[in-house]
Each structure stands twice: as structure tokens, then as C-alpha cells.
């Protein structure tokens, strides 16, 4: 086989570089459609080199991480796009179980990053009905009724209603400390809430 001249070698090298670049661009496009963030770097020889790490996050970096618990088929921590609603989070967790009391929570509320969405079961006391022996143990802020909250020292019916409204607007409460954002709840009331409530 005759030896190739330098000009022929240069032409073949240029074709190879163009082919590699087109292939890398095609691969990058396919990765983008799959929703993963990856990049291809080019070395000094024109060859495509994979990036150090490919992370399966949304390219905007605005995903929300939420914990879906309670009466759902697949409780756990899930990633949702920004602007998602409580109903989207429940669907992402496999949907509610047959014994779920979905009417007890606000399905239309927007979810927040780091939020826990607690889907109550029908066996739990529904909103507006006080559970028996509610003064004996901690009350779940995720399912507590106005009447149950009203049994806490320093909490009247107006503040109890404000807590339920605050919880429903958020689609749940991940921490008792979030209640500090409600107007009219001061440090003394927060201490009473921490003593009697659980997320």
C-alpha cells in the first residue's frame, strides 16, 4: 500500500475531527432531550472528551425536593419542577392509597423546596372533628383540627384557624418552627406549640 502524503494525512485528520465534533454534538443533543446536564469538552487534538460528571438535575437548577409521606403508594423524597402543586407530588409518589383522606389537605397548594407533604388516612381525625384524648399526647400539625389546636394553652380559635389555613396553603408543614411566620404567634406561644405539636 503506497504511503500517504502529508497533504492527504492532513485532509483525513480534518475529516476525522469534523466527524468527532458532529458525533459529540449529536450526543449532547440526545442527552439534553433526556433531561440530563452533561457537557463535552474538546482536547487540543480536537477529540471529544466527556465531562468529569453528568448530573441528572434540571438545567435551570430550580427543581424542588419534597418529602411525600402518609397514605401514598410510594412514600419518599422526590424531585419536582418549580411551580408544582401538592397533587403533582402525590402523583409522583404513586398516587394516594385507597384509605387516603385527600380532602383533608389542599391539593392545589404550591409545593416549596424541602417541604414534607403528609397525606392523612381516613382513620385519622378529619378536619373539624376533635380526636378523643387529644390532650394526652402530641398533636400532629399535619392533620390537627381547629378544635384540637384550640386545646393548646395560649391558642384560641382565631389562632387555631390561622394555623390550619397556613398549613393548607402550604400543603403541609415540615417543621413546627414554620408557625412562627403566622401573625400573632410570639415566642411564648411558639414554646407551647413545640411542646404539644409534632410535624
Image: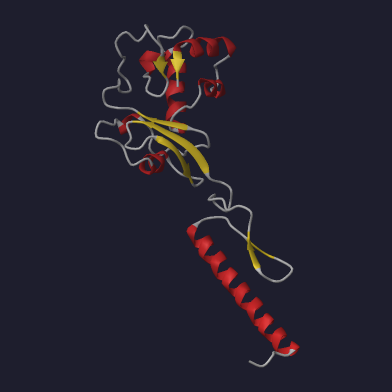
Report whether 71 appears left or right of 7. left
Report whether 7 appears left or right of 179. right
Q: Residue at x 69, y 71 (%)?
A: 46
Q: Position of residue 138 (x, y in %)?
A: 41, 12
Q: Residue at x 46, y 6 (%)?
A: 153
Q: Position of residue 85 (x, y in %)?
A: 43, 41
Q: Position of residue 91 (x, y in %)?
A: 36, 43
Q: Residue at x 50, y 20 (%)?
A: 176
Report whether 128 appears left or right of 22. left
For the C terminus, which image quadrant? top left
In the rendered image of this protein, does residue 114 appear above or below residue 20? above
In the rendered image of this protein, does residue 1 appear above or below residue 110? below
Nearer to me, 172 or 1: 1
In the rendered image of this protein, does residue 136 appear above or below residue 86? above
Q: Position of residue 169 (x, y in %)?
A: 45, 32
Q: Residue at x 32, y 40 (%)?
A: 95
For the N terminus, which image quadrant? bottom right
Question: Residue 23's image quarter?
Answer: bottom right
Question: Residue 102's image quarter?
Answer: top left
Amino acid at each position: 500500500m503506497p504511503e500517504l502524503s502529508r497533504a492527504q494525512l492532513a485532509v483525513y485528520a480534518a475529516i476525522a475531527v469534523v466527524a468527532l465534533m458532529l458525533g459529540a454534538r449529536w450526543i449532547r443533543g440526545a442527552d439534553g432531550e433526556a433531561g440530563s446536564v452533561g457537557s463535552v469538552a474538546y482536547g487540543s487534538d480536537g477529540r471529544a472528551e466527556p465531562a468529569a460528571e453528568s448530573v441528572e438535575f434540571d438545567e435551570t437548577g430550580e427543581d424542588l425536593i419534597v418529602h411525600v409521606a402518609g397514605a401514598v403508594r410510594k412514600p419518599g423524597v422526590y424531585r419536582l419542577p418549580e411551580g408544582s402543586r401538592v397533587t403533582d407530588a402525590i402523583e409522583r409518589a404513586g398516587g394516594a392509597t385507597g384509605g387516603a383522606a385527600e380532602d383533608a389537605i389542599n391539593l392545589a397548594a404550591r409545593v416549596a423546596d424541602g417541604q414534607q407533604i403528609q397525606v392523612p388516612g381516613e382513620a385519622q381525625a378529619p378536619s373539624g372533628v376533635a380526636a378523643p384524648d387529644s390532650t394526652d399526647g402530641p398533636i400532629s400539625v399535619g392533620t390537627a383540627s381547629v378544635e384540637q389546636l384550640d386545646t393548646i394553652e395560649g391558642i384560641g380559635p382565631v389562632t387555631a384557624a390561622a394555623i390550619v389555613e397556613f398549613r393548607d396553603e402550604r400543603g403541609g408543614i415540615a417543621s413546627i418552627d414554620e408557625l412562627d411566620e403566622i401573625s400573632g404567634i410570639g415566642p411564648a406561644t411558639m414554646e407551647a406549640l413545640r411542646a404539644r405539636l409534632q410535624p
